[in-house]
Amino acid sequence: MITLKNIRENQDLISKKLKTKNFEVNKIEKLLNKDSDWREGLVLVEKLKEKRNSASKQISILKKENKPADDLISEMKNVSSKIKEIDSKNVELKIEIDNLLLDFPNIPHDSVPLGSDESSNKIIRTWGEKPKFEYEIKSHIEISEKLNLLDFKAGSKISGSGFPVYIKNGAKLERSLINFMLDMHVENGYDEMFPPFLVNSDSMQTTGQMPKFIDDMYQIPKDQLFCIPTAEVPVTNYYRSEQLDESELPVKFAAYSACFRREAGSYGKDTRGLLRLHQFNKVELVKFVHPDNSYNELESLLEDAEKVLQSLGLHYRVIELCTGDLSFSAAKCYDVEVWSPYENKYLEVSSCSNFESFQANRGSIRFRSSKTGKMEFVHTLNGSGVATPRLLIALIENYQQKDGTIKIPKALQRYMNISAIED
């Protein structure tokens, strides 16, 4: 969350920065007007209280001297009523200010490319080569149905579209991918966590899902809980309202979770097969780091996500998102996109973001700086390490064989205990 103090002192700069993120900057003026009214109210209340305190002393003296004080007492009753009125208005103003602040996105880092939408994103690098086939290739849908890996019709019957059923070797492949990624990240220094899949509204607010994206979430109103859209939410909130020891930083977690997204507003987008789901699996990487090191930590986070695809021998590219394509909470973000031969395009399987102090401010996650002796907010980062649906698409399509079987990448063979998936 951007602090009110920062907005007061740097209005022009923040307006300029947030405008590049397609934010309605007139909201800044609205916020500052309310802030001005709130502060004026505080000053006026203090003056009225001083007047009331002074009058109370006068009234006490008048009573001791048996002199009339009724007029002054009556006047002070009016002053007390005025104080209550202003205090009540200020409480309402403070609530409005806090709610407005929650709607402000994070400020883009200076290094982020300028642009209004994804057309201004930059390709940073590619890895590997696109596979070449000497035969007509099939889609992941056709292959997985032929080999009895996925059952989309059963998923629709049980839950609805966007809820596939993984069966037999399809279920085993999904589980193998999750275990493979968790093992890899633990070897790279992450602590494994298995978090709850349901969280409260405070958790959603910390990471920036609420209040802005409430329509994208599955809710359980009776219990006031939400199905998580990513493990980022519960893992980041692990330290909510707590103080970390500076010597412990960075703290790194790798967590598997199911992810639930209503995909509100996605009508008309490609929803075939595993391309866009309401429930899917993902291994998430979350870091709590020192502010001085957060951008170095972002680069290493990106490398950790890339290692998954490199180990599986899959061609991919890394995209640096422009200001207009950044998420609400991110100050800087890279997307990792794997190649799908049948779709003939790249598919996003990971986003690696630095949120700087944005989430830590909302969730009050701090440490005491050895340099200043003061409490500071940690920087939080997260990245998919990685999401399985589109990874599975790439695996099935890239490793399909002419005879209809799927070759298992060497890195996965010890998890699958087979070298190929056959009829």
Image (cartoon, rainbow, N blue to C red):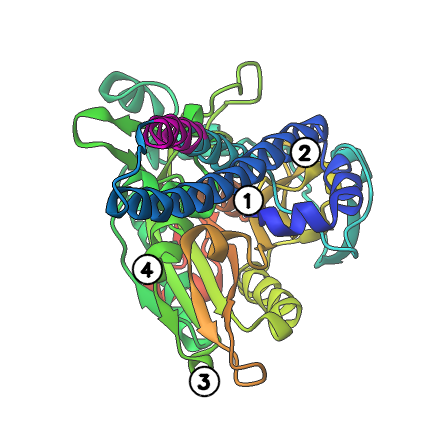
Query: How many residues crowd mark 2 within 10 Å: few (<14), some (14–19), many (20+)?
Result: many
Q: Earlier in the sequence, mark 3 or mark 4?
A: 4
The answer to whether the residues at label 1 and label 3 have Cβ atoms under 8 Å apart is no
Q: Which residue is mark 3?
A: 247
Locate residue 244, reporting x and y percent.
39, 73
- How far apart, in angstroms, are the residues tagged by discs 1 and 3? 41 Å
Q: Say which amino acid is labelled 3.
A: Ser
Q: Quadrant of residue 92?
A: top left
Tag 4: amino acid: Tyr
Q: What residue is shown with label 2? A: 28
- Residue at 42%, 72% in the rendered image: 190
Image coordinates for residue 376, horizontal then vertical, percent: 52, 69
Considering the whole magenta stretch, tell me its main secondary structure: helix
Q: Mark 4 — residue? A: 238
Q: Are marks 1 and 4 in contact (CB under 8 Å)?
A: no
C-alpha distance separating marks 2 and 4:
32 Å
Q: Is residue 85 above or below residue 97?
A: above
Q: Earlier in the sequence, mark 1 or mark 4?
A: 4
- Residue bounds of the magenta highlight: 71-89
Left or right: residue 72 compared with residue 118: left
Task: Please tell me whether residue 96 belongs to the stretch shown in magenta.
Answer: no
Secondary element at tag 1: helix
